[in-house]
């Protein structure tokens, strides 16, 4: 039996969505720009790669066939007409724009080489990253050239919210916008984002939105068992806690010890914010060291999970509560706060903002006390 290479990173499930994308791709009815959105780690970039592979496949009768020359190149991430960009750390020692462009291109190729080696990488690296103007200019240069092999080429821009770079200049986003306004005939763009609200409206309005929902927990668990050799209990636990994201589930498998601590600490934060007593939030923030804030990424993810659980408890969806051992606390708190879905969503967003800030060089105590005050206002009902 021939063993097919695993698509890097593997893409699973979503058969109905893939069938409709497949139809649109083969009839040529898909607009030049697509925006895949969904929660972090749910497989948006893998879906983008699958779409490009599907469109460029030259085999028969199923696309992608995974056997033709085009598919093989795509599976090895070596297809000359699939250009995959993603946020990168800003290279050091890049003194001129030309040097920066070169260094970024080198970093991108190194990362692609990593993906080939380790297609199943856990979520949650903690570098400060961006998609810089130099990268967009490189995309523009390529987009105006003819495709190398077929009649079209694909540009995948992963985590496109990083287009607004750390230095808060919208240049990169504007440069991309210009390209999307007048896309060269043979070039197609697939953006992905976990926070589509952070993209320029003008970019969003040019793209066909495709929502990638989370996978059911049992599919994630089956994947972790089958592809990663996780034992069934660990796979089930990680799948439940990951809320349908394979990327997040891989992170959970890697970090079980850390996770228990983060879960406990984030619950303290939630209790402080939901308690409505300012002093508690302040005290909670003081328990965090003054060192870097990047260690807070997991903590914030755990806090988001608690808030989502509060939302599920508020709506009486007890079966959707992940931290089921605290169901009683969650239900009581949700009732006391008279929580509504829009306040839950706003609270999750506030923590997401804090998570983004944690990537930068901020003081963890300030970050925590800031987000707790915001959460307090959002979660506590107006008098
Ligand atoms: Zn093929």
Image (spheres, grey):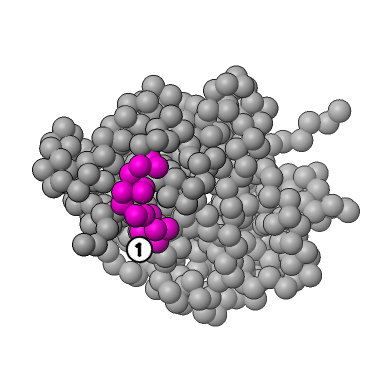
Q: Does the magenta-highlighted stretch encompass residue 366?
A: no
Look at the numbered disc 1 and give the secondary structure of its residue.
loop
Residue picked out by circle 1: 164
Residue 164: x %, y % from top left: 35, 63
172 vs 145, nearest the viewer:
172
Left or right position of 38 against 232: left
State which quadrant residue 268 falls in.
Answer: top left
Left or right position of 233 against 196: right
Classify the position of the C terminus by image quarter: bottom left
State which quadrant residue 63 falls in.
Answer: bottom right
Residues drawn in magenta: 330-344
Residue 1: x %, y % from top left: 86, 28
In the displayed orientation, state which residue is furthest to the right: 61
**Residue 67 visible here:** yes
Q: Residue at x 71, y 61 (%)?
A: 21
Q: Residue at x 74, y 67 (%)?
A: 24
Q: Residue at x 48, y 57 (%)?
A: 193
């Amino acid at each position: 039996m021939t063993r097919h290479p695993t698509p890097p990173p593997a893409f699973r499930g979503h058969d109905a969505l893939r069938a409709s994308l497949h139809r649109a791709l083969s009839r040529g009815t898909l607009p030049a720009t697509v925006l895949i959105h969904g929660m972090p780690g749910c497989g948006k970039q893998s879906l983008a790669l699958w779409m490009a592979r599907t469109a460029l496949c030259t085999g028969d009768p199923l696309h992608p066939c995974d056997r033709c020359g085009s598919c093989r190149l795509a599976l090895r991430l070596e297809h000359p007409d699939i250009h995959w960009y993603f946020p990168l750390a800003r290279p050091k020692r890049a003194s001129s724009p030309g040097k920066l462009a070169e260094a970024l291109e080198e970093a991108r190729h190194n990362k692609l080489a990593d993906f080939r080696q380790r297609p199943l990488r856990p979520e949650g690296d903690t570098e400060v990253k961006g998609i810089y103007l130099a990268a967009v200019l490189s995309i523009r240069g390529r987009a105006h050239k003819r495709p190398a092999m077929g009649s079209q080429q694909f540009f995948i821009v992963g985590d496109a919210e990083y287009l607004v770079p750390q230095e808060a200049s919208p240049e990169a986003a504007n440069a991309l916008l210009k390209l999307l306004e007048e896309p060269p005939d043979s070039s197609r763009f697939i953006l992905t984002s976990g926070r589509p609200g952070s993209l320029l409206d003008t970019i969003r309005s040019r793209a066909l939105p495709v929502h990638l929902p989370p996978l059911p927990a049992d599919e994630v668990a089956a994947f972790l068992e089958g592809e990663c050799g996780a034992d069934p209990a660990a796979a089930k636990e990680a799948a439940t806690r990951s809320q349908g994201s394979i990327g997040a589930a891989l992170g959970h498998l890697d970090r079980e010890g850390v996770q228990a601590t983060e879960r406990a600490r984030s619950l303290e934060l939630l209790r402080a914010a939901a308690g409505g007593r300012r002093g508690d939030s302040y005290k909670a923030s003081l328990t965090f060291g003054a060192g870097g804030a990047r260690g807070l990424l997991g903590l914030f993810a755990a806090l988001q999970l608690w808030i989502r659980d509060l939302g599920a408890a508020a709506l009486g969806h007890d079966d959707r509560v992940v931290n089921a051992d605290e169901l009683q606390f969650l239900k009581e708190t949700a009732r006391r706060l008279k929580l509504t879905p829009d306040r839950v969503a706003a609270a999750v967003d506030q923590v997401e903002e804090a998570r983004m800030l944690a990537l930068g060089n901020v003081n963890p105590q300030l970050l925590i006390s800031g987000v707790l005050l915001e959460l307090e206002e959002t979660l506590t009902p107006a008098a």
